[in-house]
Amino acid sequence: MITLLTKQLHKVQAAHGLSKKELAVSKKILQKHIAGALARDQHFHNIVDDTETVRIIEQYAASVKGSYDHVVLCGIGGSALGPICLKEALTHLYAAEQKERNHPILHVIDNVDPAMIAEVESILNFKRTLFLFISKSGNTAEVLSMYLYFKARCIKEGVPFSDHALMVTHAGKGKLYELGTKDELPIIEHGPVGGRFAVLSSVGLLPAALLGINIKKLLKGAKQMRDKFLSIDPKQNLPFQMANMQYLLTKKGKHIHVMMPYSQKLFRFADWYRQLLAESIGKEVNDKGKKVNIGITPVKALGTTDQHSQSQLYNEGPNNKFIMLVHAKSLHKTIRIPSLYKGDKSLAYLQGATFNQLIDAEREGTADSYTAYNKPNITIQIDKVDEVHLGGLFMLFEGATAFLGELFGINAYNQPGVELAKKRTVTYLKKKR
């Protein structure tokens, strides 16, 4: 179960928080925004019904099980952040150090820094490595350059490239597809979704399946939240509730939104969400062509780590932030703090407690401190970090982002501001040779 706990939001002074009355919305208004979001003809909400792609992915994953020790994913932005989140949340945090493993280690190259490429390459046995190239357009410079590089390295190592590589892209489109077809690589269709909305498509499901993650359970959680996204009952529609809070708080000057999971395994979820929010809502013009320069700046934080690096700013700095704490009721396991030094009264509060209780107390105390300083905050509560709940979280924020686009009157699915840098990159690279 996923729950939005808003009591702290209501306790904040009216100028900075939101009352239940402010958040109230009619079914008629909600229906309007659902219709608007669906009219954009994006498929993030129904990509989870693509059983054929699931069948193909599971079949492929089963066919190569045990064949590879490493999977090197070459992608950037939405082609990388979702898979990284899935790996961190649903596999062992220190898989690379485990002596015995049932599945390969995933390495994601989402930068063209030569240090990253060289150091990943230095740990690979090419005979036991699978290269996965992901690009929606098939024309992403970073992915194409890595394709050329690792093909050449496979040739040098005497490894058949077609047996050690596959791609996720649009069939029949783009340079990646052209090269992959020529090299006889297997291809799995990217699907009709933009990169930052693609984690529940083949982009995320394929690497997840290769890591042994149960992708059907992931989609089960996503479908449950998708049904809420389509619900005309304001009490059931959690994605709209989330978007409505964010939208109304921007009207009160809260243009920085902090995602702060109290779970090490969800830290990369905040990374994934950062792209989703920034690229979807940061727009120069609205649907009417009017220049508006709309945007929400996403910040990632981690409880309890960032209580000691960011909370001073959040509490005593400018009141321009909305903070979303994420709480997993059941963490990985219960670990008790040993009852040593029993005569030391300064340690009495720790004696016999668990790390689970400590992290919960830290979260609750931090939320209370934000409220005391009139900094709006909510807690997003899940039962535990598993496939079902992570799938639900993905869909919760994809749906909320779609609704934010409607509330702001902008297109949440395009990214014209990214294109200029891509064009300039080609120009400068030509000058450097």
Image (cartoon, rainbow, N blue to C red):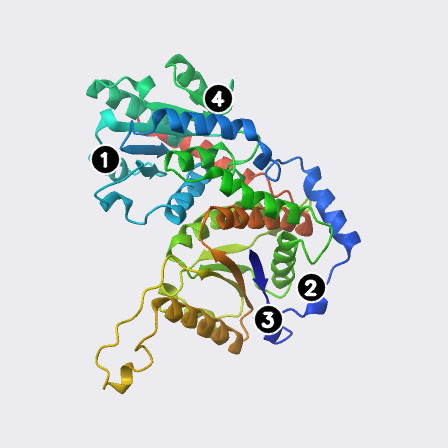
Residue at which label 1 appears: 118
Q: Residues within 10 Å of mark 2 (few under 14, many from 20)?
A: few
Task: Between label 4 and label 3, give the one nearer the viewer.
Answer: 3
Rounded to the nearest angstrom, the CA distance separating label 4 from label 1 is: 27 Å
* Image location of residue 8, percent across then percent down: 57, 71
Residue at which label 3 appears: 7
Residue at which label 2 appears: 23
Q: Is residue 344 above or below residue 368?
A: below
The earlier-in-sequence mark between 1 and 3 is 3
Q: Are marks 4 and 2 in contact (CB under 8 Å)?
A: no
Residue at the image position 38 percent from the left and 57 percent from the top: 332
Task: State the SS at label 1.
Answer: helix
Q: Is residue 317 left or right of residue 162?
A: right
Rounded to the nearest angstrom, the CA distance separating label 2 from label 3 is: 13 Å
The earlier-in-sequence mark between 4 and 1 is 1
The earlier-in-sequence mark between 2 and 1 is 2
Rounded to the nearest angstrom, the CA distance separating label 1 from label 3 is: 50 Å
Task: State the SS at label 3.
Answer: helix
Q: Is residue 376 above or below residue 432?
A: below
Find residue 152 and report its image quarter.
top left
In this orientation, does residue 278 appear?
no
* Image location of residue 16, percent across then percent down: 60, 71
Task: Between label 2 and label 3, give the one nearer the viewer.
Answer: 3
Q: Residues within 10 Å of mark 3 (few under 14, many from 20)?
A: some
Q: Residues within 10 Å of mark 4 (few under 14, many from 20)?
A: some
Amino acid tagged 4: Gly
Residue 174: give its label.
Answer: 4
* Image location of residue 431, percent across then percent down: 35, 28
The earlier-in-sequence mark between 4 and 2 is 2
Q: Is residue 416 above or below residue 231?
A: above
